[in-house]
Amino acid sequence: MDCGRIQEKLTAYADGQLNPKERETVEEHLRVCPACRESALQAQRLSNLLVSVPALPVPTDLTAQIQAAVRNRSARSKIHRMPAIMVWWREASVPLRAAASFILVVTFALGTLMSLKITQATSRPLEPVVDYGLNSFAGAPDGSLEQAYLDLLTTSNGGEQ
């Protein structure tokens, strides 16, 4: 077996988790390979060290603490998905929400009144304004091509007088 496959099995070997056939294969390789033998010694030292460390006591309410943390995080993530105005509205006090609502109503009312006032002031029909941008032809002499163009464009019946 090559070193790469042996290296993958060294932790399980040090912890005594290999079946007898795999254990024998690893030991045969360790007899002939000094690099893997050194890695196996390090894995064994680490395993012994981990076994010697006392297990920490688990708090009795650990499950409840984890579930509460998940609920809080879930609630916060729902708030962060809302638009900022909705988050502000949820967290604002009742008087502040009432004041904001009042301001919105007054703003809409004033906007409506102002738009009515503007439409009443301009209710007379607008006179059509025709500007062909031909101001440069204004001084054209009679009989010139420029004057003919002006006559065609400014008469209402297509140039016939």
Image (cartoon, rainbow, N blue to C red):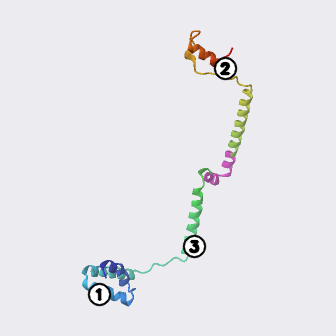
Q: Quadrant of residue 60?
A: bottom right
Q: Mark on residue 158?
A: 2
Q: Secondary structure at mark 1?
A: helix
Q: Is residue 98 above or below residue 2?
A: above
Q: Secondary structure at mark 2?
A: loop
Q: What residue type is disc 2 on?
A: Gly
Residue 129 as seen in the image, left or right of residue 31: right
Mark 2 or mark 1, which is nearer to you? 2
Q: Secondary structure at mark 3?
A: helix
Label 1 belongs to which residue? 28
Residue 41 as seen in the image, left or right of residue 131: left
- Return the residue nearer the eye: 45 or 94: 45
The residue sitting at 68% across, 51% down in the picture is 94
Q: Where's the C terminus, which quadrant?
A: top right
Span highlighted in magenta in the image = 86-100
Mark 1 or mark 3: name the one nearer the start of the chain: 1
Q: Quadrant of residue 52?
A: bottom left
The residue sitting at 57% across, 17% down in the picture is 135
- Between the C-alphas of marks 1 and 3, the distance is 50 Å
Mark 2 or mark 3: name the one nearer the start of the chain: 3
Residue 160 % position (x, y): 68, 16
- Return the residue nearer the eye: 121 or 56: 121
Residue 63 % position (x, y): 55, 74
Residue 124 as seen in the image, left or right of residue 10: right
Query: Principal SS element in the magenta part?
Result: helix
Graded by Cα atoms within 10 Å as few (under 14), some (14 to 19) or many (20 or more), the crowding at tag 2 reads few
Q: Mark on residue 64?
A: 3
